[in-house]
Image (spheres, rainbow, N blue to C red):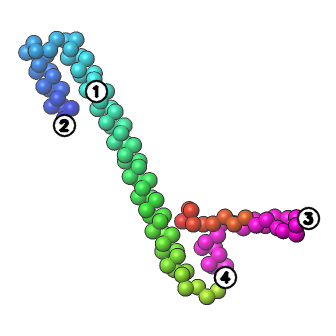
Amino acid sequence: MYDLRNNLSLLNDKVTGVLSETEFGIIKNSNTIEIEKSKEKLSQLDSEIINLKSDKSKQTDRIKLFEQYKDITELNKVVLDAFVTKIEIGKVNSQTSERPINIEWNLYSA
């Protein structure tokens, strides 16, 4: 609505001779560029809002997950599946007798 009123005002100034054709063109192009920049910024902000809502939803899901299992008495497959995506067990190091274990937690994608 603003850009329409503004453009009508510019057009009126052009018609009444307050602005030359060149001045009118320069100001109108400048306004058009500003409008496009504002639309891009609005689109970026909309994307940020969507991402923040998604992050909040994931956080809420994590809280619910912890609430659901905060009083567990035994570690079973159901609990492991809720918290762990994958467990990788490496080969035993013959010198140290240690074995690397990598746990991929499900907490970051919940």
Q: Which residues are magenta?
A: 75-101
Label 1 neighbourhood size at 10 Å, few (<14), some (14-19), many (20+)? some
Q: CA distance from mark 3 to mark 2?
A: 75 Å
- Specify which label sits upstream in the sequence, 3 or 4: 4
**Residue bearing mark 4:** 76
The 10 Å Cα crowd at callout 2, few under 14, some 14 to 19, many 20 or more, is few
Q: Is residue 62 left or right of residue 29?
A: right
Q: Which mark is residue 1?
A: 2
Residue at 67% x, 79% y is 77
Q: Mark 3 and mark 4: span between their CA atoms?
A: 33 Å
| Left or right: 78 in relation to 64 | right
Query: Where is residue 48 shown, x and y percent of the image?
Result: 41, 49
Q: Which residue type carries mark 3?
A: Gln
Q: Earlier in the sequence, mark 1 or mark 2?
A: 2
Label 3 crowd bin: few (<14), some (14–19), many (20+), radius 10 Å? few
Say what secondary structure mark 4 lies in.
Answer: loop
